Image (spheres, coloured by chain):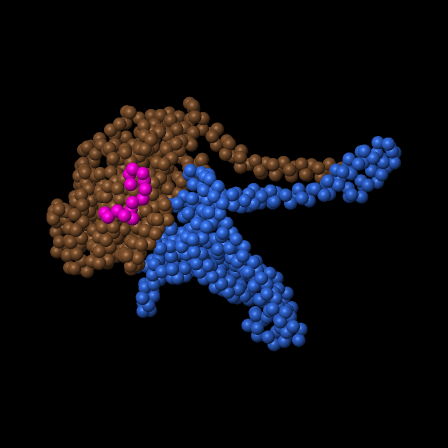
Chain colours: A brown, B blue
Amino acid sequence: MRKTTRKMWAAAAGVTGIALLATACSSGSGTEGEDEPSEGGNITLTVATFNEFGYTDEMFDEYEASHPGVTIEHKKAATSNEARENLNTRLAAGSGLSDIEAIEVDWLPELLQYPDKFVDLTDPELDGRWLGWKQAQATAPSGELIGYGTDIGPEAIAYRSDLFAAAGLPTDRAEVAALLSENGGGWDQYFKVGKQYTDATSKPWFDSAGAIWQGMINQIEAPYENPDDNSIIATENADVKAAYDAVVQAAVGDNLSAHLQQWSDDWNASFQGENAFATMLAPGWMLGVIEGNSAGVTGWDIADVFPGGAGNWGGSFLTVPAQGANTEAAKELAAWLTAPEQQLKAYASKGTFPSQVEAQKSPDLLGSTNEFFNNAPAGEILVNRSEGITEVYKGPNFFAVNDAFNNALVEVDVNGGDPAAQWESAIQAINALG
Amino acid sequence: MATSTTPPRLDRRASSTPPRAPRRVGFSQTLGRWDVKVSPYLYISPFFILFALTGLFPLGYTAFVSMHQWHLIGGQGPFVGFENYAYILQEPNFWKSIRNTFSIFFLSTIPQLMVAIVLAAMLDANLRAKTFWRMGVLLPYVVAPVAVSLIFGRLFSDQFGIINTLLGYVGIDPIGWHSQPFPSHVAIASMVNFRWTGYNTLILLAAMQAIPRDLYEAAVIDGASRVRQFFSITIPMLRPTIIFVVITSTIGGLQIFDEPRLFDQLGQGGPSRQWMTTTMYIYEVGWGNQKSFGRAAAVAWILFLIIIVVGMINFSLTRRISTDNSSKSRKKVKR
């Protein structure tokens, strides 16, 4: 008998242990929601961003002070790709997202297909806070506004005045702007000056074919998809083919490119190299990247000019995923973070150029200079560059199609592939999406 | 103790109260029988329950998903049968990923195993500061794979990398580590080798130390050289361990993901998918631009089947080679 009971106890303990193990996962997720009561009491709001949004701890402290009971946690991802993967995965899983998730304009359209996964942030009081096209980007066809705009990327030209001087080109930023604006100031003029420079020095004019591609595509009204039904038109769009031919001619035909893939290790290192390129397309947020990669290099400056008119590259939004426990409080915080005053502070901290109409008129912004870029009046230049930006239609497949063309251009520009064959393989990749 | 005392007690009770005894004894006997029959299963069940939850269920569910149209965010769609499999099998990128996976697998596993055996044999010899050398071999394994990939990615940069600079001194043209398939496979395989050779060395070393020393003594008396001893005693005696190492590195090698993904900044496996492995392809199909879980699940199942087949081929190959060797060596040692 004794033996039996002892064994029975052991067995009972074993069974309980297994049962506990098996329920461990389910009870874990069950208690998560209970930690954060949604009505009254203390709540914790998490804010997930990527790269550098320029939000400082002081800003969060200020909000916490004026909203007792609210604690803010800031999570930063290193790259926008990483943030996109995290968002997609957890959106699919239905849990685990932060109360506020930052998203980038290029992959925003994918999410616009699922407005019910996000809180509708429409608020009559905030009408007119952002530039019209910025707000339109985050509005779903059915009318919901899923994100509040943070920054935009109006593009200027960053150039190395020391390299310009060596090639006998003007170095003053007004003269450079005037030079690039001659003959209508199109891409042809930019490439023409580049050819002069390259002929004189046999050094590269710009960093990467992919960068020029971004600049050109962001000036075509509806490059890849038909705005009416989202069908992919990239393969027949004459503008896209013309841009491809122009980029290939400039990068490989005229050898103006440094033959680097943007964001690669080689690209990062090339800022310091002897064969460094002389110009770059520079949206506001790129200025920080250039400075970070160019330690010890002097001579960078910004010219108030951009080939082919104005263009916007990048820019982000704050969204409130519907799966969160405190969506009302999160909406309030998102509205506060994207208010002009806060965005100006973010600009001062990391150079993220505001998308808010009022912030763009602020004297703080207009008067700001950038020490690294030879004390250029960066704020004023970017405000000028943001004038005349038109909305580029980006549908749900924009990211994927752009990716295919970028891959083709890397093969041609960096790896010496055949332009026609690579165009064909990009078309194949795009057709596989449908 | 308990076992010796219980049976007599039961007997006594049974004899004192005959009418009730059968029921009571019957019940405790049933309990006892259950105890004997069921409890062993109970004791081993935690593993199987956990395996069913974390291994078997996902496997079955993946098969279920692979038969449906299934969007990452949109969720389950209609049942499509084997359409996803048919789609995957006609995709050129899938076949590229298979080519890359096997190329990287061969470039990493085979040299790695050979180097690991030789290293283990050297560590098995009478060295000074044995523990130091043994720990040194394991050191790369401790380094996080992401850090290894970042460092090697830099070493293998096309224009500014150290390796191409060094090759330049010897007069070799820079190699397109990030532009051509084969060099990129060599670069990735070198990361894998850096990380895993030490680990396999220690496993093989442990097995080597279990080889009875009198075999070597007998061989020395027979006049066998060190090399001969290595091939005729050490390798055949390592047979089970080699099988183990080969199978684990097959599974690991065919599922390689971290190193190729971090080989450049975009993590897509190159602009023309020069070094995209099959696991990266799963990721691209499921989480990348197509966001199709159904197709990703189909690739996962195809990969599973490939691993099983390759694992079995490996198993039979290693077994046959080792058997041949060991039978020969036994004969020779006898003589």
Q: Quadrant of residue B235?
A: bottom right
State left or right for residue A257 relative to residue A15: left
| Residue situated in front as seen by the camera: B176 or A234 | A234
Q: Which residue is depicted at the point 38% across and 50% down?
A: B267
Q: Residue at x 33, y 68 (%)?
A: B172
- B201 left or right of A90 in image: right
Q: Quadrant of the N terminus of chain B?
A: top right
Q: Quadrant of the C terminus of chain B?
A: bottom right
> How far across and how far down the image is residue B99, in percent?
43, 58
Spot occupied by residue A207 in the image (x, y as percentages of width and height): 25, 53
Residue that protrudes farthest toward the top in the picture: A40
Does any portion of residue B28 appear in the rendered image? yes
Q: Is residue B259 above or below residue B63?
A: below
Q: Give the percent coordinates (x, y) of residue B137.
A: 49, 59
Q: Residue at x 75, y 41 (%)?
A: B33
Boundaries of the magenta span: A226-239
Considering only vertical position in the picture, is B219 above or below A402? below
* Figure label count: 0
User: Residue B93 at what x, y percent from top left?
Assistant: 40, 54
Asked if residue A269 can be seen in this view, the reply is no
The magenta stretch spans residue B200: no
Does the magenta run of residues contain A233?
A: yes
Dominant secondary-structure state across the stretch colored magenta: loop
Residues A234 and A301: in front is A234
The residue at the point 38 percent across, 35 percent down is: A114
